[in-house]
Amino acid sequence: MSTIFIGIAGGTGSGKTTLTRHLKEHFGDAVTVIGHDSYYKRQDGKTYEERSKVNYDHPDAFETSLLVEHLKALKAGRSIQCPVYSYVDHNRTDETVEVFPTKVIIVEGILIFQDPTLRDMFDIKIFVETDADVRILRRALRDIRDRGRTLESVITQYLTTVKPMHEQYVEPSRKYADIIVLEGGHNLVALDMIMQRIANHIASED
C-alpha cells in the first residue's frame, strides 16, 4: 500500500480542523488524522501553574522528532502508539492510541511546516488562511467552551504567545504550502479540489 501524507497548517482558529473533518467524513477509513498537538512534550515535574505558562505556540513545545519517527513507521506499513494530550491539564497523558497505516494520512497543526524534516515528508502541503480577528474569536469560543479556560486567560495567552509566535513562525511557513485555502473547510471549491486529489490516489491503489 502506498501512503501519501497531507499536511494541513495555518494559524489558530483558521479552519484547519473543519477542513480536516470534512475530508475524514468524506473518505472514512481510507484517511487517518494525526494532530501535531498530540506530540506536545511532557511537562512532568511542573505544577499546573507552571505548565499553564509554557509557550505552547513555540516549536520547542513539540516533540516533533517522535512524530517524524511515527510517520516513517506508518510509511513502512507499521502501526504506531500515538500520544494523547490533555488540554485541560496542559500535559501529555500516559495513554496512547494505536494508529494503523492507511492510504492517506493527514497531519494537522500550526507549526508542521516549520520543521524542515517534517515538512519534507508531506506529499501535499495545505495552508489555511483566515483573518486574524475571526481566528481569535474562534479560539476564544473553543478554549472557553471545550478546554475550561477563562476569557482573561485566553486573551493573555493570545497577546503574549499566540500572536507573536504566529507572526514569527506560523505565517512565514505559509510560503512552503502547495495550496493556500482561504476560510478553511468553508471554501467548497478548494475542498472539492483536495477531495479529487485524494480520490485519485485512493483509486490508483485499488
Image (spheres, helix red, strand yellow):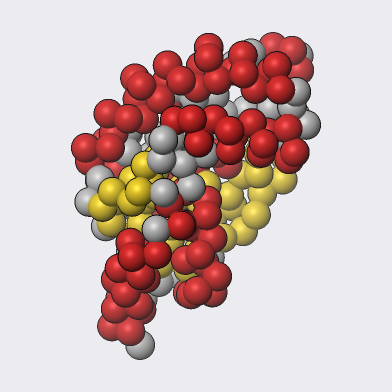
**Residue 31, image x, y percentages:** 48, 68
- Residue 25, given in percent of the width and then of the height, sits at 55, 70
| Residue 125 seen in this snapshot | yes
Residue nearest the viewer, comparing 188 with 33? 188
Above or below, 25 relative to 9: below
Residue drawn at 25 percent across, 45 percent down: 177
Find residue 58 and report its image quarter.
top left
Image quadrant for the N terminus?
A: bottom left
Number of numbered discs on residues: 0
The x, y position of residue 77, in whole percent, is 42, 67
Q: Residue at x 28, y 34 (%)?
A: 173
Q: Quadrant of residue 56?
A: top right
Q: Is residue 136 above or below residue 30?
A: above
Rendered residue at 26%/52% (across/down): 179
Could you say which is closer to the camera, residue 62 or residue 10? 10
In-front residue for pair 206/98: 206
Left or right of 60? Residue 196 is left
Decide if residue 43 is in sight here: no
Q: Nearer the viewer, residue 149 or 119?
A: 149
In the picture, the quarter occupied by the C terminus is bottom left
Q: Is residue 28 above or below residue 113?
A: below
Residue 74, position in %: x, y?
Answer: 43, 60
Q: Residue at x 26, y 57 (%)?
A: 123
Residue farthest to the bottom?
A: 206
Where is residue 67, by image quadrant? top left
